[in-house]
Image (cartoon, rainbow, N blue to C red):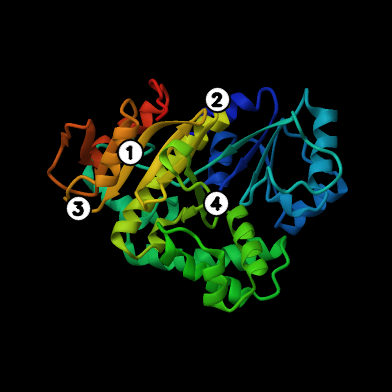
Amino acid sequence: MKNRYLSLQIKNDLKSKMVFLGGPRQVGKTTLSKNLFPNAAYLNWDYSEDRELILRNELPSHNILIFDEIHKYKKWRNYLKGFYDKNKNEKRILVTGSARLDFYRYGGDSLQGRYHFLRLHPLTFDELNSTKWSDFESLFQLGGFPEPFFKGNKIEAQRWSREYRQRILRDDISSIERISDLGSAEHLLIRLPELVGSPLSINSLAEDLQISFKTIKRWLEVLERFYAFYRISAMGSPKIKAIKKEQKHYHYDWTLVKNPGLKFENLIGNHLLKRVQFLEDTQGRDIELRFYKDRESREVDFVIVEDQQATIFIECKLSDTQVSPHLKYVKSKFPNTRAYQLTFNSKKDFTTPEGIRVCDAWKILTNILDELNNPKEKSIP
């Protein structure tokens, strides 16, 4: 795909500030940047020649400069601040990286107010602009990263995924973070997909891997900063006895998840997170992806929360089943909030007496995401 969903936003934001484009490695940040600005100067910190140009401050005289992986330079923020303040009327600066660029704040000066931060996600059904079941099934089987998806080969996608996980640790993380035992960290990364959809317990992981709680906690934070996975928190309200402290996690590469039902849940979670973060990054809205769980262990997979209020509940089911009693319960507590039970592939499409829409995900997912652009009335239990 020559253009991605952030293409227009990047061009518009560059007119006034620097743009920081973050996201998982190989999600398409460099390809997108070069396609948008084919005449720009591209400088990659991982290339020794480009690194020397940056350190010597001998930058090309192009109007647009693309800095890739410059966050690996300890003084990168001060470097960009000085260059931007001196050249902001003549130069446009796009910074890309496979880590949380809003987190790595080495150096004393802040870049506050000088950049827009955008997050690029893997391909999703809505971005493909498709209405075909076959495209949705391909996403499910191959993942949303451009290289394996467009190759269209499941075996090649599995090989890519395995190598990808190793490169995150040994190329990206080890270049910035100090992790003495990469083998154990890799074991943790292999273990995590088996726990998708369940509360993520650091204590259980520490006991299982025979590693200290403190070390596991730090490794999880590092892996999350490098987009190996993401965590969502429980939505809470005292009136519904919700559990607020628990977190679940999902992977940007959902093909790592072998259980088909949890893999489908992960796929839907990525679609929701992508749209939520787009609205947060581009419109400044206070919107989050969470899940619902109360003290009676009633749970709904996902809930979109905006301005601290529920807007959409979504339950994921692999095949035709009865409507989730937990979703029915939550709908009774939030009668004005939209609720959906999405299935992977079935013939059913109906609305329950409670007002819950039950439908194949591929038929309605894009419409649900578009609803987030124009939220309806929210409700409080």
Q: Nearer the viewer, residue 200 or 14?
A: 200
Front of the two marks 2 and 4: 2
Label 3 crowd bin: few (<14), some (14–19), many (20+), radius 10 Å: some
Residue 2 visible in rendering: no
Disc 3/disc 2 C-alpha distance (Å): 36 Å
Label 2 crowd bin: few (<14), some (14–19), many (20+), radius 10 Å: few
Task: Check disc 4 and report the residue beneath it.
Answer: 24
Tell me the number on the disc at residue 61.
Answer: none
Q: Quadrant of residue 303?
A: top left
Circle 4: residue type: Pro
Q: Are marks 3 and 2 in contact (CB under 8 Å)?
A: no
Q: Is residue 309 left or right of residue 207?
A: left
Disc 1/disc 2 C-alpha distance (Å): 29 Å
Disc 1/disc 3 C-alpha distance (Å): 21 Å
Q: Is residue 357 left or right of residue 77?
A: left
Q: Between disc 3 and disc 4, whose residue precedes?
A: 4
Percent position (x, y) of residue 270? 42, 46
Tell me the number on the disc at residue 319.
Answer: 3
Percent position (x, y) of residue 265? 35, 51
Q: Are marks 2 and 4 in contact (CB under 8 Å)?
A: no
Residue 367 visible in rendering: yes
Quarter occupied by the C terminus: top left
User: Vertically, is 155 above or below 272?
Assistant: below
Percent position (x, y) of residue 279? 50, 30
Task: Check disc 1 and report the residue beneath it.
Answer: 330
Quarter occupied by the N terminus: top left
Front of the two marks 4 and 1: 1
Q: Between disc 1 and disc 3, whose residue precedes?
A: 3
Circle 1: residue type: Val
Circle 3: residue type: Ser
Residue at x 35% of width, y 37% of height: 313
Tell me the number on the disc at residue 283.
Answer: 2
